[in-house]
Amino acid sequence: MNAFNTFEQYFRQVSDLQRATFETWMSTFPGMQSFGVSNYRDNLNKALDFQENLASNSLELQVQLTRISVDIQKQFLEGYFKVLRSWW
């Protein structure tokens, strides 16, 4: 649970930093005031959805690669012991 809290705090700090950076950037360009905060929130939500989807897909890929790796190791070891037994 401690690692989860650490990651949650880290991502919250990154989000706060992104928001502060964007707001500072918007304040330096007078024409950007019409851009609106609502578009910023929509874009942030879309970016977060994309990141969440990317992380989810990455984890699923890791699960599949791990399963493939274990299956390959299992087949190798089964063949290894089969060969050793056939010699005796």
Image (cartoon, rainbow, N blue to C red):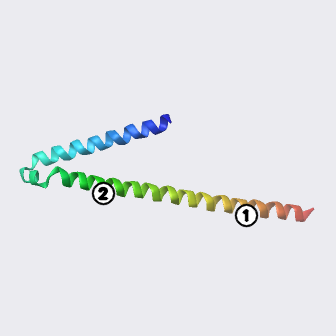
Question: On the picture, is 14 further left or further right than 56?
Answer: left
Residue at the limit of the structure toward the right, as seen here = 88
Disc assigned to residue 6: none
Q: CA distance from mark 1 to mark 2?
A: 43 Å
Query: Mark 1: which amino acid?
Result: Gln
Residue in the image at 78% along x and 62% along y: 78
Residue 70 picture quarter: bottom right
Residue in the image at 30% along x and 44% along y: 15
Instruction: Tell me where residue 57 appears, x and y as whole percent.
Output: 46, 59
Residue 35 picture quarter: bottom left
Viewer-proximal residue, 84 or 19? Answer: 19
Viewer-proximal residue, 78 or 67? Answer: 67
Instruction: Tell me where residue 73 appears, x and y as whole percent.
Output: 69, 59
Residue at the limit of the structure toward the left, as seen here = 30
Instruction: Tell me where residue 61 appears, x and y as whole percent.
Output: 52, 60
Query: On screen, 14 above or below 58?
Result: above
Q: Secondary structure at mark 1?
A: helix
Residue at the limit of the structure toward the top, as seen here = 2
Q: Which residue is mark 1?
A: 75
Disc assigned to residue 46: 2
Question: On the picture, is 81 further left or further right than 63?
Answer: right
Q: Secondary structure at mark 2?
A: helix
Residue in the image at 36% along x and 58% along y: 50
Question: On the picture, is 62 further left or further right than 9?
Answer: right
Choose mark 1 or mark 2, whichever is in front: 2
Which part of the image, by quadrant, shows the C terminus?
bottom right
Viewer-proximal residue, 30 or 78? Answer: 30
Classed neighbour count for the residue bearing mark 2: other residues with Cα under 10 Å, few (<14), some (14–19), many (≥20): few
Classed neighbour count for the residue bearing mark 1: other residues with Cα under 10 Å, few (<14), some (14–19), many (≥20): few
